[in-house]
Amino acid sequence: MRKKDKKQLPLMIASVDHPHAVELELISQILNENPIINELVLQDLTHGVNNPASGANGMSAEQVLRAAVIKQMNSYSYEELAFHILDSVCYRSFCHIGFADKGFGKSALCGNIKAISSETWEAINRILVGVGQDKGIEKGRQTRIDCTVVSSNIHEPTDSSILFDCVRVLTRILGQLKDMFKDLSIVFSDHTKRAKRRMLEIMNAKDANARKSPYMDLLKVTKNTVNYAQSTISFLEATPCMLTAQSAVDELNYFIDLTQRVINQTERRMINGEAVPASEKIVSIFEPHTDIIKKDRRETYYGPLLSKINCDTYS
């Protein structure tokens, strides 16, 4: 009979009949059969602790490992992980969190999971592959690598804005060197404001023809700034204070090289109308490794590919 409401909730929740719950149960069995994994995690968690037997009760090594498994399986953030472990019956059971236990906050989860070293994860992978070999599930002769990217913290890249970045960075370094080496006759003109005006003109231009003239002037200003930097290098290489001077020379050479590449790609694209391959483009002088990844009509600017080995190769 259907009722308007339930006066009292049951004390015990029935087991969940779901493929994900079955998967967690199988993972739990493997972890229970290999307690050495918990020992490895515990060593990382207690590293540098003078008296591990004292202090407040925190997350056990087993709970930290199982929380990390849930996070990896679902790509949760630490805030999402804290909520789902506390909210889900399956996750509470998998992490051995009691019915009346409070659970763990995102800061505790983050600190404990990050304490597990890469060497420990490698050792865990070796143990799991060994388990797969013993049970005839996995031969361990191939390596699977998951490749992903991280977003670069850069502004929207345009040739004009990158040229402006080159001018202001080189000018800033030259100003610092002039104050540092007052005995040297470091002479340069600050074209930062002029470069910024040209950049704004380009941004607000109506069409390509209107952008060409300010681009020409911006390129001229950028080349002049590069010449100032190259002249300064000649003075620094002759200074007796070689240690500080060499560091400044290296920094100037680094940004001069990037600036010349930006000048080259701008002249090819905006002046000559040439299509520059993506592999030859620089979208930021601060994150020069950044690549452009196209998804449909969207363009996203990402850093270098990061490879994480999920399982090692064994014979």
Image (tube, rainbow, N blue to C red):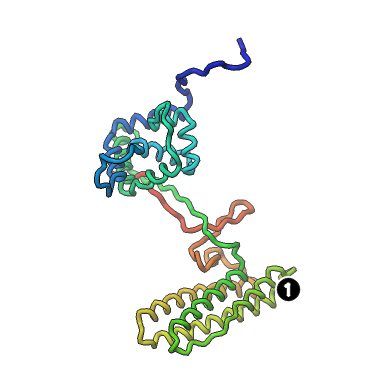
Q: Residues within 10 Å of mark 1 (few under 14, many from 20)?
A: few
Left/right of residue 25 with respect to residue 259 in the rendered view = left
Q: Is residue 270 visible?
A: yes
- Compared with 247, 185 (above or below) is below
The image quadrant that residue 199 belongs to is: bottom right
Q: Residue at x 52, y 76 (%)?
A: 172
The image quadrant that residue 219 belongs to is: bottom right
Q: 306 or 279, which is in the foreground?
A: 306
The secondary element bearing badge 1 is classed as: helix
Q: 92 or 131, which is in the foreground?
A: 92
Q: Residue at x 46, y 43 (%)?
A: 78
Q: Residue at x 40, y 40 (%)?
A: 68
- Compared with 272, 2 (above or below) is above
Residue position for label 1: 210
- Compared with 234, 58 (above or below) is above
- Tell me the quarter of the image containing the C terminus: top left
| Amino acid type indicated by mark 1 | Ala
Farthest residue toward the front?
55
In the image, residue 1 lies at what x, y percent? 60, 9
In the image, residue 221 lies at what x, y percent? 60, 80
Farthest residue toward the top?
1
Q: Is residue 315 visible?
A: no
In the image, residue 176 lies at what x, y percent? 48, 79
Farthest residue toward the right?
206
